[in-house]
Image: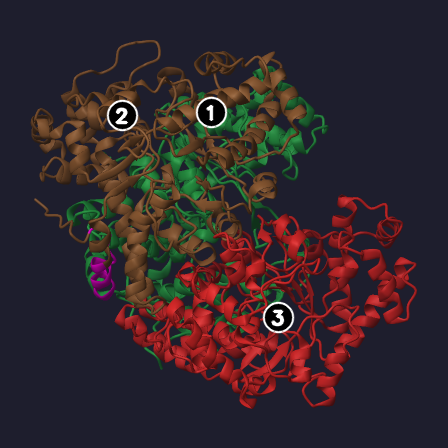
Chain colours: A brown, B green, C red
């Protein structure tokens, strides 16, 4: 049985750099986790019920896993992924687990492998390597743990040393789970679990049911969204409600990074066209683009940090979407342009240090050419961590290698996990901390940075920067 | 005279990783060569005649070499590259060889340098380093070897430990050389030398003489290509003939990766327009795009693996093309889009595990952003090895670094040499194996993969994966 | 107080490679500096006056520094950057210096940090690390040095071991400073300080005041620029004057790399339209594109090496431009296409070894895909060093890793500093030499190149190649 030493996981193999990296990593490892953006279901922590079986917890909802098996011909239904039409899927957790274990070799060299393996070890204390032959043993060990009270969500939250976790909700959400969290002393402004304002479903005219959603937005906010002015008022009202539920940021997931600074009259015409069902794709793009500028304007008033996640072609895998719906692994990145796309917003508010706009990307080709020069030249811009397909050791390393020279460390936000997989939060942050330790160790080994400054930087990246950037308090030289 | 230790060629310099890489490389080195795609002339092995002089063998036909000298002002005619109009070129092998040796420093740091140097050493047993002053000595040594029976093509094939080699032919080819090979026990289904179905010259309306070629296709297949239906029937007939000659795959070299799923009526209209000589560039692009979907459909019936090589701007160097013709080093890569381009084909057949579509690229910017997410999310897609300008140690390494985290190892095909330079086949595969060994050694050294799994992976990449992906038999956990 | 060993700055940390790199670097370090392109004010060396205070010398004019502070909310006026309307800015050098020191941590991991730190040490002999607490001490030490005669520009030029430095002037410039330099034995053909012909302000119809500039060009050249023929004659005359002032190259800073080979009649029509104030953006782009071909034609006659710097979106930061003008850090790179853009020029002159066209880029995604294949396939093309946002250790390393395999070393020009910061010239060249030494050391350590060839190559890159490419004399095997 191969043994697998994890102390030096991901640290540079060359002994001199490894020694430096160990020292730096140790400083990062003890920092609490700031998770400023992600998709954990707030009900998980509001209700604090035991987790389901290992497969339902770790495999079925993780599209990194199910898409890889799909790529080798295993249909998602065989792994328990629910169908839109309710046609039957595999429900036996053990069967799913075994099926997954039989394909474990597919994940060699992937972050999913790291995350799962470290979750087994550090969350569940299970050290048996996953193999087809050990699948049942692992399943049983993890299932036994999940039955223990120490493995309920809130207990794990404490054990994970999470200081604050932001979930993501639509303006249509009633925030009842966050109200429950606040009532329990876990939520609300300055709380441990807060929300994020994500208005795509009421902003993107191409979103299924947009116009109906806008009606519901009016009802929820007590505003008349029959007019554009009422629409803006409703959005402002919901932002206020989100802020009351602890939100410190908004998030925007658009196909592109396009922004557009329309006059109110132009925006109103677009809005009305959309509400009459007459908007075409160009109208929808223009309206999304304009609304980014509108939200920047609102942020100047209410202080929400803006996050922009552009570049996903949603539901590229049509068969998967038709059968299993959204967000099950069928999205694919596309080339994303920022320099011209962001110009209108930046012309308006780019030099205003009261605005904070955090940019993410699925297109690492933009790191050096576009993102680092922009973040290093505009007061309002910051670079979020590598996102989604890019939240992996190799890309985290390349992110530092390609972004630091033009933008420095302090125009980046520190790590953002963006995950719905609650149990993987510690390992995801751990991976980023290890990679940053390795990068800083190289700078030290190449005499580009003295050790004391590297030590301050690693703690900034792990803790102080995300805390400050996302307005979770803290003051510091940053 | 500097000595040059080749045992550890390309293995990571850090001693810890080098030790691991040596161990892994040793496992790969003993595997037979699977060469699933390339451009070796089948006559070479069918006729098994002695090779010509060293310059005619190693320099004149190698456009990696002649284009580099052209870039420094040495005209290809001075290196013996034949002209279209028959105007005279250098024919004295020794003169060509000396001229080349005088520019040997241009190749420092290039794969051509590695390939040639290793060919001298491992194929011809010549250890004198090439210099202007040693040019004649090397020429004489190699010329002497080429006269020996052990240096005939079939003898080298055996010595190279090639298990199977696929050449590439047009549907217009009569496959006579492959018939001869089959008669000699070297070819045919399951044989050592097989063909590949490459229909560009009868598919691409912009190909010189397309319409005439389509007439000849009808003659060759005994079908009436006056109609679109007859054209499809002729293609199907030729595919059957190629399969009978051992083909397991088709290959498609298009300017872009565009696919289009037209109705038969639409396709027929395009075809007729082309046949009437009325097709414009957009028609040609649409027809190529549609035919990729059509060939995917045929593959579901006859089982040929599809290969797509997009992104070359053919004959970019117009002077070179006018003077010396096609395929002499005048092509240049262009930016290549896959996500939207492949969507029509993928919507139709992307989730069908019976289809295997191997994607290549000349645009490494797409590795992380497009190719790895696509290959890691569709059952039909696999990633071929870095191609042409990219089949070099640095890019082979970057390929693993950028592709593995989203696609894993098992959505890649293993190495594909794609060469017409028969004598360079062993070193090209050797280079890829060394680079993979180095990459896997790093994963082990960073505790991301245990050694036993790395050992299994290196053998999969070197042998089992290409054998299975390209339907050369073999069964395994893959 | 941390100590900071600079002997091995930027050399690979692994001891084996470091030893090789040290040996190679030592060979490069003793070479004189060839600075074939940059923006040092010739008045500096013509007048040889003492430098102003440390802040005015090192901070105020360096937009790498002021833009980083702007990105964190510090307005350029607070750092003394002059305003267009003359509204007041900070003028107290010590205040500016302290403000800068307070943000020194922003530069961790950036080339600006390296350049400044090494300038402090190697130019001024100041070894105190910069900190907020040491700001005054450093300021005083550097100010004291600047008062000494050894720190005047010409004395530093000698100490820096610069063999030749090319400044950059407009055809409208009277070249009086260069005449003064020639009179002092410092300038003129073959001199130590020469000029470069940079005609953007009389070529780019979108340049502020283009038509007026063209009038002035006619006056300066004694030609009638009322006609296109007179315009060309004026440009030729100014080129001759520049050559008489020592110029060996021209430089062209265009938004794109577009070239266009118009007939004289077409070009004339465009020119006339521009002169009548009727040209639109497409006309301006076409005229720029055509003029590149025209300048190539002139180069065949007069021997000036062409340099092309495409891809900057000028004045992207509109607020910064409105307040502080051009060239103060408000430009941002954009994606840049070369393969199709350069085709017209290359079709005409690409295979003519008498033309030398040096390509630069702000878009490193083109290194492997476009620039290396082009430079490795056309006699006229060479690749300049990584430029501007890319002139940093990580990109210099990636440049070699991505370009060498297709273009070799000898289709690159060696390092080009392109700086106006005179005191940073030695460290910028030093950084490039160290990175090249590290890259070559890796090739040696991986047995891809013997040490003697690496040693020859590092000297070629540091000295012989730029000297020969830019026609500063020297002959060699190159």
Front residue of B207/C304: it is C304
Q: Is label 1 in contact with label 2 (beta carbons under 8 Å)?
A: no
Is A430 rendered above or below residue A458?
above
Q: Marks 3 and 2: in contact by CB < 8 Å?
A: no
Element under disc 1: helix
User: Which quarter shows the C terminus of chain B?
Assistant: top left
Percent across and percent down for residue B404 are: 33, 43
Determine which of the numbered discs, if any, sits on residue A242 in the image. Answer: none
Pointer 1 residue = A200
Image quadrant of residue A162?
top left
Which chain does tag 3 point to?
Answer: C
* Residue corresponding to mark 2: A182
Q: Chain of mark 1?
A: A
Which mark is nearer the camera, 1 or 2?
A: 2
Cβ–Cβ under 8 Å for marks 1 and 3:
no
Q: Nearer the viewer, mark 2 or mark 3?
A: 2
């Amino acid at each position: 049985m191969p043994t697998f030493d994890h102390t030096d996981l991901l640290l540079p193999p060359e002994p001199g750099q490894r020694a430096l990296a160990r020292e730096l990593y140790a400083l990062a490892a003890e920092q609490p986790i700031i998770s400023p953006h992600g998709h954990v279901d707030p009900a998980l922590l509001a209700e604090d019920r035991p987790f389901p079986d290992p497969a339902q917890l770790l495999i079925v909802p993780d599209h990194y896993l199910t898409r890889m098996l799909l790529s080798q011909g295993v249909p998602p239904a065989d792994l328990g992924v629910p169908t839109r039409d309710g046609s039957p899927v595999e429900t036996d957790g053990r069967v799913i687990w075994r099926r997954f274990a039989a394909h474990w070799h597919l994940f060699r060299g992937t972050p999913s492998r790291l995350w799962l393996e470290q979750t087994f070890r550090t969350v569940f204390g299970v050290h048996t390597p996953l193999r087809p032959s050990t699948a049942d043993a692992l399943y049983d060990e993890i299932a036994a743990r999940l039955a223990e009270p120490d493995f309920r969500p809130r207990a794990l939250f404490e054990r994970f040393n999470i200081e604050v976790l932001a979930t993501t909700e639509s303006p249509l959400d009633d925030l009842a789970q966050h109200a429950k969290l606040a009532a329990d002393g876990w939520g609300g402004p300055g709380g441990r679990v807060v929300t994020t304002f994500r208005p795509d479903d009421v902003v993107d005219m191409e979103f299924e049911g947009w116009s109906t959603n806008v009606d519901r937005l009016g009802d929820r906010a007590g505003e008349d969204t029959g007019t554009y002015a009422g629409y803006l008022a409703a959005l402002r009202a919901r932002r206020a409600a989100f802020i009351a539920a602890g939100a410190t940021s908004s998030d925007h997931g658009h196909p592109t990074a396009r922004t557009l600074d329309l006059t109110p009259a132009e925006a109103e015409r677009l809005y009305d066209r959309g509400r009459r069902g007459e908007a075409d794709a160009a109208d929808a793009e223009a309206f999304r683009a304009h609304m980014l500028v509108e939200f920047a304007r609102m942020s100047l008033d209410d202080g929400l940090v803006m996050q922009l996640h552009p570049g996903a072609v949603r539901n590229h895998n049509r068969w998967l979407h038709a059968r299993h719906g959204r967000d099950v692994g069928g999205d694919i990145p596309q080339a994303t342009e920022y320099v011209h796309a962001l110009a209108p917003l930046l012309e308006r508010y780019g030099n205003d240090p009261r605005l904070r706009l955090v940019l993410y990307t699925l297109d690492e080709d933009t790191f050096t050419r576009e993102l680092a020069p922009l973040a290093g030249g505009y007061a309002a811009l910051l670079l979020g961590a590598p996102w989604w397909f890019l939240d992996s050791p190799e890309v985290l390393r390349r992110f530092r290698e390609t972004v630091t020279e033009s933008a420095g460390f302090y125009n980046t936000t520190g790590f953002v996990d963006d995950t719905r997989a609650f149990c993987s939060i510690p390992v995801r942050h751990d991976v980023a901390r290890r990679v940053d330790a390795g990068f800083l160790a190289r700078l030290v080994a190449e005499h580009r940075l003295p050790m004391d400054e590297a030590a301050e930087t690693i703690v900034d990246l792990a803790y102080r920067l995300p805390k400050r950037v996302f307005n979770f308090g803290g003051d510091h030289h940053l």
